[in-house]
Image (cartoon, rainbow, N blue to C red):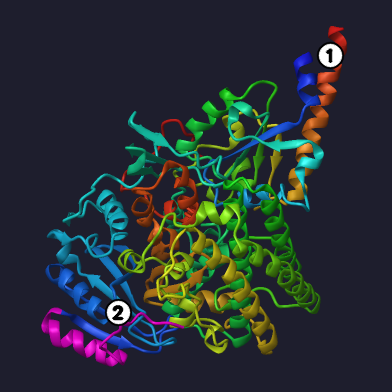
Amino acid sequence: MIFAPEYASLATSHQEVLNCLIEVFGEDLGTPLLDEGRPSGPVITLTVPASRLLAFVERLGEFDYPHLSSVSCEEREDGVILHYDFSLFRASSPGEGLMICVALSPQEQKGMIPSLSGLSPWAEYAERELTDRLAVEFQGLENRGPLLDRREEPTVPPDYVVLPLAAAGRTESFALAVRLVRGRIGSVRFHLGSLHRDVETLAMGGDSFQALPLAERLCGSCSFANALAYVRALEDASGFDVPRRARYVRSLFQELERLSSHLLWLATAFHGEGQEALLAATLALREPILDVQEKLTGKRSVSAVVAIGGVRVDLSRQGLETLQSMLAVTRRELRPFRDALLRGGLLRCRMEHRGFLPKAEAVRHGAVGPVAKASGLPVDRRSHSPYEAYGELDFLPLILERGSGEAGGDVFDRLLMRVMELSQSLDLIEKIVEGLPEGPLLAVPKRRNLVGALKEADGRGLGAVEGPRGEVIHAVTLHAGQTALSSWSVTSATRRNLSLLPRLLKGALLDDAMAIVNSLDPCLACVECLLPLKAGEELTEGGQRR
Amino acid sequence: MDRHRDGLTKALSIFRYNAGSCNGCDAECLALWGPRYDLERLGFRRAPSPRQADILFVTGVVTTRAAKNLRHLYEQMASPKGVVAVGVCAVSGGLFRRSSSFAGPLDALLPVDVYLPGCPPRPEALIEGLTRMVLRWEDEGGSEGREGS
């Protein structure tokens, strides 16, 4: 485990962080509160006036880099509240991560809000989305166009080249166009909107527990991570204590999903490079994992494991046998696979020294997941704010650093990182099976009591998990006396890593563009689906409403 | 319809379009090409573009924008051609049928040959659906061919 010394922190305890903030900002901070006992880990909640937001974030950057985890909004009768959630990771040793939740009060919305895009580039997308939806003005936001167009196909200017994403094996339909300047990529445009399903509005129509199947279908390859993050947000708001056995089962499925998602990614990466034999080998490796999921849950994927306050499936003896044989097979097959990749060959030649992401840039962009770790940045929810069983599994994130202290971070490193995470997930699964405790699976087994408990909950809940692509954060707001959600926002890992796309493509050769795009694993289903309609907007032309 | 029958003597190419899917069905479509299901052994291939394709796989809720694309994609394909609605979202809208982005079930836009509900459908179901479609084509093409001769 290597912590980057240049970002090492001043503060030692959570209370000291809070004291420092109060010392600097004094009266400006409204009701600062440190809550150590939240299911989502220690959280400082406070309000900051818009005029001091930038100074506040810069001050946070002195503890740690300003790791903006999510931006969300909550519409109330008296106006809109913006929530900025920050994570202090590096300032703390593993297991002591701290979240700082900043709310901008309704009165502030009338004035201008400073844009955070200068400090954390991915904030641009969130701010453009909010500008489009709520007509909030962000001061200093450079690109102002709406983030996605749900009606019209983008018009690509004639001097742009559209990248053939589908042909390269990506499953999404999004238009990515680049303009070449002297043979290299000069500027990048991407157009979102064709995958938008308006999930948030759908969820608001029902009860909070009815939205769980929707959360599970935000993304097919990180379905469990999204369902878990959503349920953890509800549990955070309503204070359920999840039984220990359920925590282990959750961690197990989290790792199974990581295995299947990474292998699926590897398959598309090999397909993109025209390596059909490796594609077949990867898909063959993936099947035993889906078999385990099927044996345990009855379904290969999207399998409704997680329930509010626990899990729906137990590990049967048969299921565990399948799991053990999967572990043996995957371990045996993975080693020669990894060795062959490391030995090099054509694939390594194609991927090395391309799409290089230096560590400092990964920090600036707030990169997450394997992309960050491949650049030597140890950000991982499983170690910093251990959730479910991870606190008991001695988990430390892997990072890639080359021998000379020089950090990695090219396309090949990101591939290697994911392959290394496969072995790590297998280790974790072994530990989970060994340490699996006996006990109940649900905190509140009776549906009626569950609904009652959710009805009593009041306030904002956060659920953060480490999905296959990195941090996935769901934030919900519940009001006492209601079972419906008041707000729901999702910040997926791809949304965080999306600002890297133009950054890494700039200056690259067109030949390398597809490899670079793929190395970020831009899974757009969950980026696009939570951008709700503007009030009064109606899509009628070309479509039938039922 | 000799072309129909001739076309079937060659490998059939499949082009997959994500019309608003969560990637769940797309992952199962990819699994079809792995060694366990190996669609190539049944004489299917992947097509990199709709012009080269005989069969169109559509995954996901058909969104407003995807609906417009789908028509163009379908028109680009040479006849004879088949359309498979992969997953309950493409079949009926599934969980997202009340979404404001939902442009209607796939068969309101294109003639659908195979409906494969499921979230996601199993690869075995995909193979079954494809096989049945091809067998039906062979029957139809065969009878029309005989009439012509």
In the depicted structure, whether residue A305 falls above or below residue A111: below
Judged left or right of residue A224, residue A486 is left
Which residue: 44% across, 67% down?
A: A408
Comparing A226 with A208, the one in front is A226
Residue A236 place in picture, x, y as percent? 44, 79
**Residue type beneath disc 1:** Gly
What residue would you read off at disc 2? A7
Which residue: 69% across, 56% down?
A: A283
**Residue type beneath disc 2:** Tyr
In the depicted structure, whether residue B82 falls above or below residue A83: above
Residue A304 visible from this viewpoint? no
In the depicted structure, whether residue A381 falls above or below residue A506: below
**What span is colored magenta in the figure?**
A1-28
Instruction: Bin the neighbour count of mark 1 within 10 Å (Cα to Cα): few under 14, some 14-19, many 20 and up.
Output: some
Prevailing SS of the magenta stretch: helix
Judged left or right of residue A82, residue A302 is right
Quarter of the image for the N terminus of chain B: give it.
Answer: top right
In the depicted structure, whether residue A462 falls above or below residue A490: below
Q: Please name which of the two marks, 1 or 2, marks the residue nearer to the observer.
A: 2
Residue A288, which numbered label? none
Q: What subunit carries mark 1?
A: B
What residue would you read off at disc 1? B145
Label 1 – label 2 distance at C-alpha: 75 Å
Quarter of the image for the C terminus of chain B: give it.
Answer: top right
Comparing B37 with A340, the one in front is A340
Judged left or right of residue B99, residue A448 is right
